[in-house]
Image (tube, helix red, strand yellow):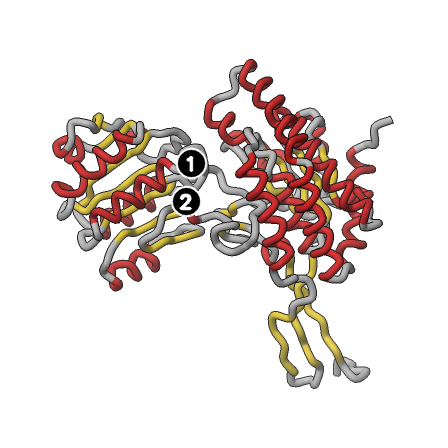
Amino acid sequence: MTPSLHAIATEACAASRIVASLHTATKNALLLDLAARLRHAKHDVLRASEADVARATQQGLAPAKLARLALTPPSLEQLAQGLEAVAALPDPVGQVTDERVVPNGTRVRRVRIPLGVIAMIYESRPGVTLDAFALCFKSGNSVLLKGGREAAESNAALASLVHTSLQAAHLPTACLADLTAISREQVRELLGLSGLIDLVIPRGGEELIRSVLEHSKIPTIQHFKGVCHVFVHARANLAKAVEVCVNGKVSAPATCNATECVLIDEAVAPSFIPMLAQAMHARGVSMRGCEACCAHSPLIARADPSDYGTEFLAPILAMRVVPGMQAAIEHIHTFGSSHTEAILTDDDDAAQHFVRAVHASCVLVNASTRLNDGFQLGLGAEIGISTSRLHAYGPMGLEELTTRRFVVEGAYHQRS
C-alpha cells in the first residue's frame, strides 16, 4: 500500500531531526558520493530524460518548458559540480551570528538551525531534484519534492541516486521524498500539512505559484515571474553593452533571469540602438520597441503597451528609449517584478544611485542579468529565487534554508 502524504511527511520530520544533528564531514561525504554516482550513472539519467522529452514533445509541451525539461551531458556535469560546490561551502548549522553578554549577566547567542521539512513544488526542471536535496541536506533539512509529471522519469532516476547514497551512509531515505506522481488534489492536501511541513517553495510558472499561495496553510516563499531590465546609461561602453544585452537575452531565453527589456538613455539611442538591433537580429531575436526605437532601426517592430512588463521566456526583447536615469527607474518600478535589474555605465555615481533606488532581489552593475543564479553567485546551487523579501530575498542557498534562534547561557540565573 502506498503511504499517505501524512505518513510521508511524518517520516520526513523524523529524518530531519537526524540530519539536523549530523557532523559537517558526514554531510559533505554524502554529497561527494552522490556527485560520483551521478557521473557514473549519467547514461541512465540521460535515457530517462530522453524518454521524458519524447513524451512531452508528443503531448505538445511548450518550447520554453521543453528547454527546461531536457538534461544533457553538460547540465549533468554542472549538477555534479554543484553537489561538490555545496559540499565545499561552510556549514551554516550551528553558526553563531551574534554573541553578547547582557546586563543580567547571561551570555546570549544567535545560532543558525535548520528549518525542518521543506516542500518544493516545481515544473519541468529535473535538475532541481538534486539542487534542492543538496541544499536542504547540507542545511540540515528533509525535503519533499513534487516535480512536474513531464519530468517523471528524470526525477525518479535522480531521486534513486540520492536514496542509494543515503542508504550507503546508513541514513534514512525519508530525507528526500519524490512526490512527482501525486495528483493536484493531493498537492492541496500536502499544502495543508502545516504541523509537519515548515516551508513551501513553489518554482515554476505564475499560475502554479499563485495556486500554491492560494491553497497553502504553510509559510511560502516565491517569485511570480522574472521581468528583468537592463538600463544602458548615457556613459556606458556601447560595444560592451551590446554584448551584455545579447548574453542576457540569448544565452537562455526561457529562464527567469533572462533580460526581457532594454532601456536606452536617449543620449546614446542613435548610436546604440542600430548596434543592438543588428546583434539581436543576427541571433534570431524579435524586437519590439517604442516609436523612438523604431526610428533608429527598421529591424524593430512597434511595441504594444502590454509588451512592457511581459516575461516572454522566448527570443523576444522589448526596448524603450528613456530621457534619463529617473525615467528608467520609474519604468522598472512600474513594470519590474523585483527579480533582477541591471545598469551598464562607466559612471560610478550613476551606478550607485541606480543600486540604491531600484528594488530587486539582485541589482547588477555592468553585468548580465543571467548572473542572478545561486551557482554563479557562489551559493553552490539554489533552491529558488525569492522576491518576497521575507524571509529570504534573491537566490536561496544554505543560509536561507536555516533560521536563527537564541541560545542563552547563565549561572543558574533567575529573573528578578
Tell me the tag on residue 370: 2
Image location (x, y in percent) of residue 29: 72, 55
Q: Quadrant of the N terminus?
A: top right
253 horizontally vs 167: left or right: left
Seen in the picture, residue 259 relative to 267 is either above or below; the reply is above
Image location (x, y in percent) of residue 234: 18, 52
Sequence-first tag of 2 and 1: 1
In the structure shown, which secondary structural element does the residue marked by tag 2 occupy? helix
Q: Residues within 10 Å of mark 1 (few under 14, many from 20)?
A: some
Q: Nearer the viewer, residue 230 or 188?
A: 230
In the structure shown, which secondary structural element does the residue marked by tag 1 occupy? loop
Amino acid at the residue labelled 1 = Ala
Residue at the right extreme, as displayed: 1
Residue at 68 percent across and 46 percent down: it is: 36
Name the residue tied to disc 1.
252
Tell me the tag on residue 325: none
Residue at 55 percent across and 33 percent down: it is: 72
Amino acid at the residue labelled 2 = Arg
Q: Quadrant of the C terminus?
A: bottom right
Residue 193 seen in this snapshot: no
Image location (x, y in percent) of residue 263: 25, 43
Q: Give the image quarter of residue 122.
A: top right
Residue 190 seen in this snapshot: yes
Q: Are marks 2 and 1 in contact (CB under 8 Å)?
A: yes
Q: Residues within 10 Å of mark 2 (few under 14, many from 20)?
A: many
Q: Give the image quarter of residue 217.
A: top right
